[in-house]
Image (cartoon, helix red, strand yellow):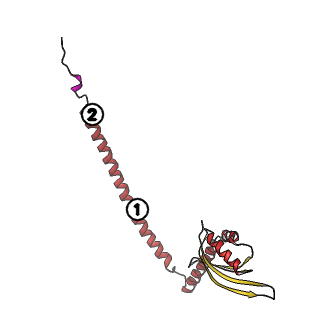
Amino acid sequence: MRFTINIATRSYLDYRRVSQACVTAIVLLLALLGWNVTRVSWNFGELRRLKADSAVFEGRLGSRPAGVSEKEYTRMLASINFFNDVIARKSYAWLGLLELLENATPEGISLVSLVPDKKAGELKIDGRAKSFSTVQSYLEKLEDSKTFTDIMLLSHNEVAAGDTVKGVLFKISCRVVTP
């Protein structure tokens, strides 16, 4: 007896359950999309409200309060600007800068003054050296350093303090790159 049943040709997928799973996934994704859209729109509304409140507060801060004379108001603003300037100057990392300069300064160089220019972002260094070759080695050491850039020798003058004592006054301009 020969049986001619081919079991491999029949598909055993339950298309009804696959369709139900797809529909359920689509409904769930649409619900998540709707929830995200409402969250985003609520956040944009909140952002607009906060910007409006910020503009109101900025307007209040920019004008003189009622009951305060113009003279008192300008004096108070000058005092606030003075203290903000003091805070800005104190926030400069002088110890770090001095340590970097100490590491870069060779023997025979004495620094007389350091003047930071925050607007130009420069540091001006005035100093004295025993000879111009010492100044050259100082410039080379500053250039080799990764901390100082745009190094320029602004001026140098030989000075004789006596018959045997000679030296060089120099001015250097550079930018300090803090790591």
Circle on res. 17 = 2
Image-quadrant location for residue 171: bottom right
Task: Indicate the secondary structure of the residue bearing disc 2.
Answer: helix
Asked if residue 83 lies in the magenta stretch, the reply is no
Q: Helix, strand or loop at disc 1?
A: helix
**Is residue 6 one of those drawn in magenta?**
yes
Give the residues in magenta.
5-10
Residue name at image x 29 percent, y 37 percent? 21
User: Is residue 96 or residue 156 the one in the foreground?
Assistant: 156
x%, y% of residue 132? 70, 81
Name the outermost residue toward the top: 1
Residue at image mark 1: 46
Residues 59 and 133: in front is 133
Q: Is residue 157 above or below residue 54?
A: below
Dot 1 amino acid type = Glu
Query: Which circle marks residue 27 in the picture?
Result: none
Residue lying furthest front: 133
- Mark 2 Cα shell of 10 Å, populated few (<14), some (14-19), many (≥20): few
Image quadrant assignment for residue 12: top left
Q: Is residue 30 above or below residue 133?
A: above
Q: Is 44 situated left or right of 58 in this image?
A: left
**Image quadrant assignment for residue 123:** bottom right
Q: Residue at x 72, y 83 (%)?
A: 168
Amino acid type of the residue tagged 2 in the rendering: Arg
Q: Nearer the viewer, mark 1 or mark 2?
A: 2
Instruction: Give the CA distance from mark 1 to mark 2.
Output: 43 Å
Quadrant location of the C terminus in the rendered image: bottom right
Q: Position of residue 143 (x, y in %)?
A: 62, 72
